[in-house]
Image (cartoon, rainbow, N blue to C red):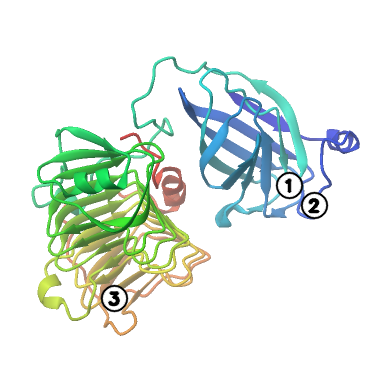
Amino acid sequence: MTLIATTAAATAALVTAGLLTSVSAQAAAGCQVAYSVASQWPGGFTGNVTVTNLGDPVSGWTLRWSYGAGQQVSQAWGATASQSGNQVSATNVDYNGNLATNASATFGFNASWNSSSNPAPSGFSLNNVACTGSTIPTTPPPTTPPPSSTPPPSTQPPSTLVGWATQNGGTTGGGNAATATVTTASALTSALNATGAAVIRVSGTITCSGMLRVRSNKTILGNYGATIAGCGFNISGDRNVIIRNLTFRSWNDDAINVQESATNIWIDHNSFSNGYDGAVDIKRGSDFVTVSWNRVFSHDKTMLLGHSDDNASQDVGHLRVSYHHNWFDGSNQRNPRVRFGNPVHVYNNYYRANGGYGVASTENAGVLVEGNYFENVDDPYHLGEGDSGPGSLVARNNHFVNSPTGQAGGSVGSIPYSYQLDTASNVKSIVTAGAGAGRITV
């Protein structure tokens, strides 16, 4: 279904009738909303919304609507969503809060429904100004159930493995091994630590603490909404591990720790927030790792590569990692911070309002920074960090919005694998549409 709503002189009548609250200082004089259901399955759907400001410029907005059939919004991107009863409020995030006259902002969300009725909202309000209109129906919902991983958007970002994890024999995780679904901390701990190849599906929210050991030849997949709360995964000396489509929050050590010469690891389409230490730390001689399509937000120390200036004997010649299409969404520092690894490939990532810095190359590392989008980042990349001496950094084809060019210098080893580089100016829209958990079917 698609709904188009606009306002004009009808606003005054709505106020008189008591259907609209008073207009704030940031209220728009008019607005237009395009609401559509991008995909729908029994029990859930994905919605897309584009709101256009037809009035004076606003610096901050909240779009509100009410559902009539008990739909419940569970996750949003491009906006912060909350719900009280039937009323949903979607508030801008940092990068799309300013709306000039005739400017638009787009966001999406996943939601649940009762599988029999999913009507579009009958109206919207932008900063307490009503947008009214009519509904245009579209294709009816499917009658066949979806796979257990309940897909979000129907048009999905690429999910093929690219980068360093394709080298050294490749990374296949559990391959075609038997699948086990876990819903408790004890079951997850046992499955991760078992010997032999396995595909492990995580369902629901699992609350735990500390670090759970992950053994070789494991694929760990999150069903829709799967969350690891309070703990993290430790891959220590093992190899061939895939971790995809999980939300990690409030971990009390690291969310994912790769160490002690662990090799061939793929960390893809996960979300990380509000943890204690690193979201993804890779160290102590580990190698052949790809970190792709992840989102990190509300977090400080993001991704450390190489833990100590004194560990050259174990790290030199290793720590080769590809970081691509990640959304460093206000994450403060270490996006990544690199020691010794060469070449480390940082490409097509979106950096937004990183308060500390984006990339740091230290201790003779070699980092290629290419095709990234830096927005409102005071220090996109530099050489050296803290007490660590400088490395080398080659920067090319990056895009800067309200951000200076960074500090580069030296040379970097050649990249041995093939990859497709997206145009840097398109990276923001590509990454925000596809990065993080809940954006792929696995």
Label number found at residue 24 = 2
**Disc 1 or 2, which lies upstream in sequence?**
2
**Contact (Cβ within 8 Å) of mark 2 with mark 3:** no
**Contact (Cβ within 8 Å) of mark 1 with mark 2:** yes
Q: Is residue 264 above or below residue 39?
A: below
The quarter of the picture where the N terminus appears is top right
* Residue found at x 40% / y 62%: 275
Label number found at residue 409 = 3
Given the image, on which type of amino acid does mark 1 rest?
A: Asn
Q: Secondary structure at mark 3?
A: loop
Give me the C-alpha separation between circle 2 and circle 3. 50 Å
Given the image, on which type of amino acid does mark 2 rest?
A: Ser
Query: Which is in the foreground here, disc 2 or disc 3?
Result: 2
- The answer to whether 242 appears left or right of 248 in the picture is left
Q: Can residue 175 be seen by looking at this rendering?
A: yes
Q: Quadrant of residue 291?
A: bottom left
Q: Is residue 50 above or below residue 377?
A: above
Q: Can residue 418 be seen by looking at this rendering?
A: no
Check disc 1 and report the residue beneath it. 127
- Can you give x and y, in whole percent of width and height, for residue 402 in the image? 53, 65
- The answer to whether 237 appears left or right of 406 in the picture is left
Local packing at callout 2 (Cα closer than 10 Å; few below 14, some 14-19, many 20+) is few
